[in-house]
Image (cartoon, rainbow, N blue to C red):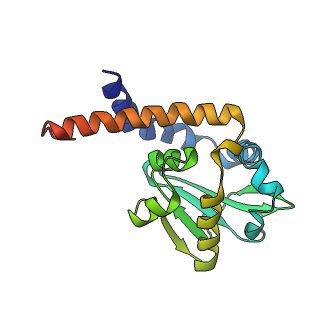
Amino acid sequence: MLALVCRDICQHAPSLLKIPLHRLPHRLQGPLLEQLLNRVLAEPLQRGQLDFLTGARLQVLVPDLDYRLTLTLEQGRLRSLATHEADVIIRSELQDLIRLSTGELDPDTLFFRRRLLITGDTELGLACKNMLDSLDPDGQPAWFRRLLGLMSAVVRQADMAVQTKAGRGEDNT
């Protein structure tokens, strides 16, 4: 039963999250996301692992949310940009970004399964992928690890429900 509830959450969460993401203007979203990302990525930022973003625009595109986040690095801090223009775009579904953030899946696995797409400046894209590879989930703040752990557990339960249904030969739609 829990697996089925989690499956429903995973199926419907993106459409529910779209509404606030599209209605909240960038001038309000931007500062909130900057604070969050600068806290979560504080260690890599301190070590200079994101310096390659200085003067560059990285866009994270989440198609199931119909959401784009464009970032750059200014004075050692990540900044959210209102533009949709980017030098490199990393594209992945929400569930895969959760798996990536918790370390359940690595960027190479997602990349070779075509579930993490990187387009644009090749050198910058490779630097982004290498940075994702080097991120240690244990280096994230404890509160964020707990939140990601909860989201990851929901995704795993949803996967189990889908696999069980597929094993019984039922339609997954």
Query: In the image, residue 138 lies at what x, y percent?
Result: 67, 42
Query: Residue drawn 53% across and 30% down?
Result: 150
Q: Toward the viewer: 173 or 149?
A: 149
Locate the C terminus by quadrant: top left
Above or below 117: residue 143: above
Q: Residue furthest bottom?
A: 122
Above or below 112: residue 31: above
Residue 7 shown left or right of residue 55 in the figure: left
Q: Toward the viewer: 43 or 77?
A: 43
Whether residue 173 is visible here, answered yes or no, is: no
Q: Toward the viewer: 133 or 30?
A: 133
Query: Residue drawn 35% across and 22% down?
Result: 2
Query: Residue drawn 66% across and 50% down?
Result: 136
Residue 72 shown left or right of residue 100 in the figure: right
Q: Residue furthest left?
A: 169
When asked about the image quadrant of residue 162, the answer is top left
Query: In the image, residue 72 lies at what x, y percent?
Result: 73, 63
Query: Residue drawn 49% across and 37% down?
Result: 152
Whether residue 98 is visible here, answered yes or no, is: yes
Q: Residue furthest top?
A: 1
Q: How many marks?
A: 0
Query: In the image, residue 159 lies at what x, y percent?
Result: 34, 39
Locate the N terminus by quadrant: top left
Residue 156 shown left or right of residue 151 in the figure: left
Query: In the image, residue 140 lies at what x, y percent?
Result: 70, 42
